[in-house]
Amino acid sequence: MVIAIVGAGGKTTVLYCLGHKLSAMGRRVLLTTTTRIYRPDDIPLYLGPPERLRPDAPLMAAASGMAETRKLAGYGAGDIGAITSLGLFDDILVEADGAARRPIKSPTTPSPCTRSLSISSSALSGWTRSGIPRRKKTYTACRCLRA
C-alpha cells in the first residue's frame, strides 16, 4: 500500500514512526518523499534512480539524491509509481508535500499531486504556536501508532 502523508507539523515524525511500526509487524517498508526530508540516521538509505532500487532491509529509505546538507531530494509521482510497480515493498510511505517548517499547510496548485500516488492519505497540522505545552502537542501522532 502507498500512503501519502501531507500537511504540516509532524509528517516526518509520523513517516518514521509508522515505518518502524509496520516493519516490526514483519512488513517490507520503504520511506521516501516527493519534496525534501532530513536524512534518517538509523535506516539504510538508497540514493539513485527508482529502477535500480533493491530492498536491503525490512525498513529503508530512498531518494533521488541529496538536496542539501542532511536533506534528501524526493522522487516525482511517476517515480513513486515505478517503485510501486516493482512490487519490492509491502508498504511505501511518502512524505508528499512540504510545509517549510510552518505549523499549518494548505495545499495549492504547485503542491505535488498526491491523488496519483496514494491509496491512503494522512493530513497533519502542527500546533507549535497553540499555547499547549510541547509534550501535549506531540502526543497524538506516535501514540496512536502504538495501539
Image (cartoon, rainbow, N blue to C red):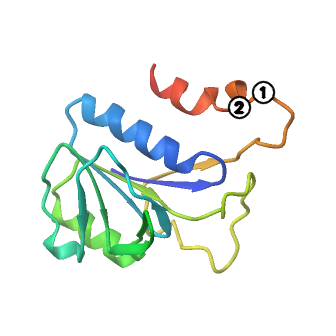
Q: Is mark 2 on a helix, strand or loop?
A: helix
Amino acid type of the residue tagged 2 in the rendering: Lys
Residue 79, compared with residue 31, is above or below; it is below
**Separation of residues labelled 1 and 2 (CA atoms):** 6 Å
**Measured from the top left, where is residue 53 in percent x and y?**
17, 67
**Most foreground residue, 107 or 74:** 74
What residue do we see at 51% from left, 63% from top?
96
Label 1 with label 2: CB-CB less than 8 Å: yes
Most extreme residue toward the front is: 69
Amino acid type of the residue tagged 1 in the rendering: Pro
Residue 89 lies left or right of residue 91; in this view the side is: left
Q: Residue 133 carries which label?
A: 1
**Measured from the top left, where is residue 121 in percent x and y?**
52, 52
Q: Residue 137 carries which label?
A: 2
**Measured from the top left, where is residue 2 in percent x and y?**
37, 54
Q: Which of marks 1 and 2 is in front?
A: 1
Query: What quarter of the picture does the C terminus occupy?
Result: top left
